Image (spheres, rainbow, N blue to C red):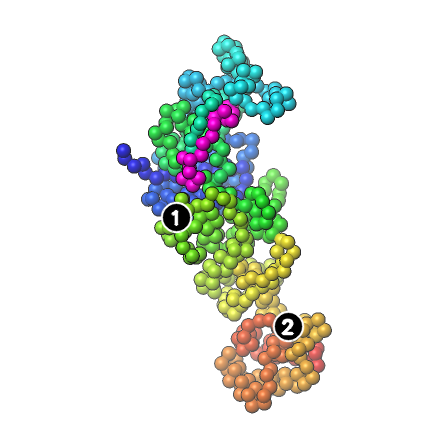
Amino acid sequence: MTERKVRVRFAPSPTGPLHIGGVRTALYNYLFAKQHNGDLIFRIEDTDSTRLVETAEDYIIESFNWLGIKFDEGVSYGGNHGPYRQSERRDIYKKYVQQLLDDGKAYYAFDTPEELNKKREEIENFQYDASTRSMMRNSFTMSAEEVKSLIDAGEQYVVRFKIEPGRDVVVDDMIRGKVVINSSILDDKVLYKSADQLPTYHLANIVDDHLMEVSHVIRGEEWLPSAPLHVLLYEAFGWADTMPRFAHLPLLLKPVGNGKLSKRDGDKFGFPVFPLEWHDPKSGQTSMGYREKGYLPEAVINFLALLGWNPGNDKEILSLNEMVELFDLSKCSKNGAKFDYVKAAWFNHQYLMQIPDKDWCPAFDKVLREAGIEATAEQEAEVVRMMKTKVIEYTDGLGNKKKRNISFASDLWPLTQFFFVTPSSYDKEGDKFIRKNWKEGTADEMRQMLSLLNEVSAWTVEGIKAVIDPWAEQTGIKPWNAWRVALVGTGQGPDMYELAAFLGKEEVTKRMNNAIAALG
């Protein structure tokens, strides 16, 4: 038997923004496809017409373009198995719905929402199956003439799959092993709705995967309960020999507590759960995105890849090519992965440290402009060089004060204001650094420094250092902390000679005179 070509698919529903869990699913499909020289298909599952959001499809495509996940065929990519948008495949699905009806493996049902709700009230844990279908309005309880008459009259109906009870259905999962479900617990799922002439996910998914020659279905754990139904549908169509292999990925879990990661968790702890900023056209609300937060796409990909998959070594920083080489579905965890947003920031720090200082500038410039500061790209890159290895303090979602490395360009602003804004006050009472380093006699020492600095002809790090260091060594004065107070206003900042060179002689002179006047 010839081995099938690996073909996998990612098939989101455009009912809202792409969740970060969906990004991980797409990434794992990408890694698996590339490792096996296979194809990755991008399909849009838009059969739930009542929940579609007009801007969602473009948002999803833009997200993958930013992340660098490339598809081989599908919506906006083209290919030989289209159309790839399910709403454009209505006639294809009707053919297969009719096949199931003709084979007696599906049936018409005319129950109204009110009738279904009434039955749920009458029967505890009601489900539409072999034990209850005889109580309902369907083609088992109605004559063929009556069914035809209702359809001809335009009465709305659904087509349900006929589940035969008492059979053990085996799902051979590449992550979880053999999963056995008895068909008696399955209900007769709706496969088609006459109201919008569209199939449900269950039918469209099976038909599309078959016609698009999908060899493996890699999807989230939340779809595992649907897998037995999909096995039965493949068999009902006579496609058991070409049924794809399943792999159900573990859930992404809350950072704290139990349950699936949600937008509410992101809002609470201050991290995004969407790849790009999302503007909800219905509510008008804006949700933060990884791109706008300042994440590099490579960092997001690296972080997500290790949430639920172990490459088998201790290396954490992996290029996309390395991930492709190492990826193994059998090394994916069966258990959910806690979403460690602090680790995500750590990954971004690692990747930021690898890029040139000038590449920080677009994001840093945006931060400066929002604060009313205009600077040249050269100035911004110089500030980045001096400050990018500093540590910042932050408060987590539980109110705890913590420290971390600079992980985003936006982290720089609280640490770099003094590069662009002259200190307006010196809080000697409230600032221990000032109190410790500005003492009686300090003002006289600063005046001596000023007179020396006025003589510096080459205002560079080397030129300033050549004048101040010999004076400090000769007099025994250690002026650097007091000088920091004068130029910065507190005890932070880079090397003082580098800072002075950046500020320029005029600004340094002004700040030192301000400090002498304010602190005495």
Q: Quadrant of the N terminus?
A: top left
Span colored in magenta: 172-194
In this view, the residue in front, 350 or 500, is 350
- Asked whether the residues under the numbered discs 2 and 1 touch, taking CB atoms below 8 Å apart as contact, a structural biologist would say no
In this view, the residue in front, 47 or 120, is 120
Q: Which residue is mark 2?
A: 490
Neighbor class of circle 1 (other Cα within 10 Å; few <14, some 14-19, many 20+) is many
Q: Quadrant of the C terminus?
A: bottom right
In this view of the protein, can residue 105 be seen by the observer?
yes
Residue visible at 44% across and 43% down in the picture = 26
CA–CA distance between discs 2 and 1? 49 Å
User: Height in image: 264 above or below 437?
Assistant: above
Residue visible at 64% across and 58% down in the picture = 400
Return the x and y of residue 375 as percentages of the image width and height: 55, 66
Circle 1: element type: loop
Circle 2: element type: loop
180 drawn magenta: yes
Residue visible at 37% across and 28% down in the picture = 240
Return the x and y of residue 228 as percentages of the image width and height: 45, 30
Q: Which mark is residue 68?
A: none
Question: Which comes sooner in the sequence, label 2 or label 1?
Answer: 1
In the rendered structure, which amino acid carries the disc numbered 2? Answer: Thr
Q: Which mark is residue 327?
A: 1
Neighbor class of circle 2 (other Cα within 10 Å; few <14, some 14-19, many 20+) is many
